[in-house]
Amino acid sequence: MVKKFFGALIAVFLLNVSICAAAELVIFHTNDMHSRIQDTDDSGHSIGLAELAAAVKKVKSQNPATFWFDAGDTFHGMPMITISRGESLVPLLNEAGLDAMTAGNHDFNYGSAQLEKLVKKLKFPLLDANVVRKNNGKLLFKPYKIFKVDGIKVGVFGLSTPETMFKTNPKNVTTVEFLNPVDVSKEMIKKLRPKCDVLIAIMHMGVDASSEYTSERIARETDGIDLIVDGHSHTTLPEGLRVKDTLIVQTGCYEHFLGKATIEVENHKIVSKKAELLTAEEIKAIAPVPDKKILALLKDANDKAEKLLDVVVAHSDKELSSERLLVRRNESELGNLAADAFRWVAKSDIAIVNGGGLRANLPEGDVKKRDTMAIFPFGNTLRVAEIKGATVREMLEHSVEYYPASFGGFLNVSGMTFSYDPSKPGKHRVEKIFVGGQPLDENKTYTIALADFQTLGGDDYSMLKGLKIVGEYGTFDEILAEYLNQVGMSGIEVGRITRLKEVPVPDSK
């Protein structure tokens, strides 16, 4: 009887050891949401925060070894959130059930002090091991956290891209510095690896070859990171990217997908890891009904934003038209004003704004927040890039290629003038171009301020895709209001673009 008892006891003990020694870690991940948290928007995506939260909560209820990490560029983007300087997103993220995140460059768009304020209200940590205060070298945020689940220790640390120093308005980061992320990663590995079974880095680095520091480089130059949850480059990695023993995952952007990485652990060692991207349909298959608490918080955020929209942010000397056929065929005062504002804040040689992006009139008199957001409703941010003179000419040729047809990509310009002959074939219409009063030098490199979507080839500006980005600023509506307050409306009269010949113009598009 005694032998049977001890035999049964040993069997139970061995079973428990086996159970504790094996675990399936599920890591859900998001990146570059840019506060696009509602289930539909003009980009056509259909996954909102309520859908994501419902799916993650469902899986967590079935497997406690489930995490949700976000790789940054979260707090800034869409008007509903930016109008509160990110405040209205905090309760939504808290309810969604994230376990940790890191800071993207655009999370500093309200300034580092405001980001600190937001982080203090989060119920989960924002991890960042390479952002320090200039005055004393102390870390701005908690660098890492060790999670314990199913007998497994999971170490997680965060990193932000040093490109933040020029990929947000420089005034936003005057009090902080970004340490070398490769060196910091090595320090984190040395500190955490002996204490953990699994080591994960949440980083806003990206995989763009033009960046000095990328997640690939960090994986290549270090040993010991099992999984990198990445962001910044808006890269879709359907099955992840493997560099040595590190798996790098990224979802693209704007919640087009929910990332899922699965790590199998046995006897405190990783035996397998894989990555996949879940579509809207797959998310709904997990949880058909969106999270009701998130939906209620979304309504509350929208209601609060509506009240803030009536705040006066600037003054206008006269009404400026955004009439569709005007701004999509011709130079306009509203387009000139916007382009001037972009060049002013970016301190660039030239600036452009597409007519299709001007969606409402600027009223005379008091200008409310809702007015600037109606003009620029898409949450676009301003970028500064380097561009060759020859590419400037190619860009302008595309701008006037379709005239007299209406074209949303028709450009208003600042810092430059040009003439074109619409009677000539498309792509051969532009004549003289002047930048800063001097003839365009096609071999010279200029700086250009433009929309983020244009640097991705939007409006078929393929020549702008892949330009070297040297600066990033806030949203268009914020920049316009600041310019009106500090500079005003002088010099916006039409006269920068000269049409050398007239051709018959259709009555409508």
Image: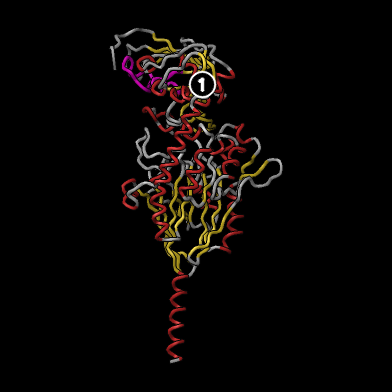
Residue nearest the viewer, comparing 243 with 413: 413
Q: Quadrant of residue 85?
A: top right
Above or below residue 119? Residue 456 is: above
Quick check: is 424 in the magenta stretch? no
In percent of width and height, residue 91 lies at 50, 43
Residue 385 visible within the image: no
Colouring scheme, one of rainbow, by chain, secondary structure, one colour = secondary structure
Task: Look at 52% across and 37% down and name the residue there.
Answer: 86
Callout 1 amino acid: Ile
Residue 60 visible within the image: yes
Q: Quadrant of residue 193?
A: bottom right
Task: Look at 42% across and 21% down and name the residue there.
Answer: 358
In percent of width and height, residue 489 lies at 53, 14
In which quadrant will I find the N terminus?
A: bottom left
Task: Look at 68% across and 47% down and name the residue there.
Answer: 138
User: Can you identify the residue that label 1 sits on?
Assistant: 350
Quick check: is 397 in the magenta stretch? yes
Above or below residue 170? Residue 121 is: below
Task: Estimate how packed mark 1 is, as few (under 14), some (14 to 19) or many (20 or more) residues with alpha carbons within 10 Å.
Answer: many
In which quadrant will I find the C terminus?
A: top left
In percent of width and height, residue 300 lies at 45, 37
> Going by the image, does 133 lie left or right of 86?
right
In percent of width and height, residue 87 lies at 53, 38
Task: Look at 30% across and 11% down and name the residue there.
Answer: 505
Element at badge 1? Answer: strand
Which region of the structure is painted magenta? 392-412
Q: Residue furthest right?
A: 136
Above or below residue 255? Residue 169 is: above
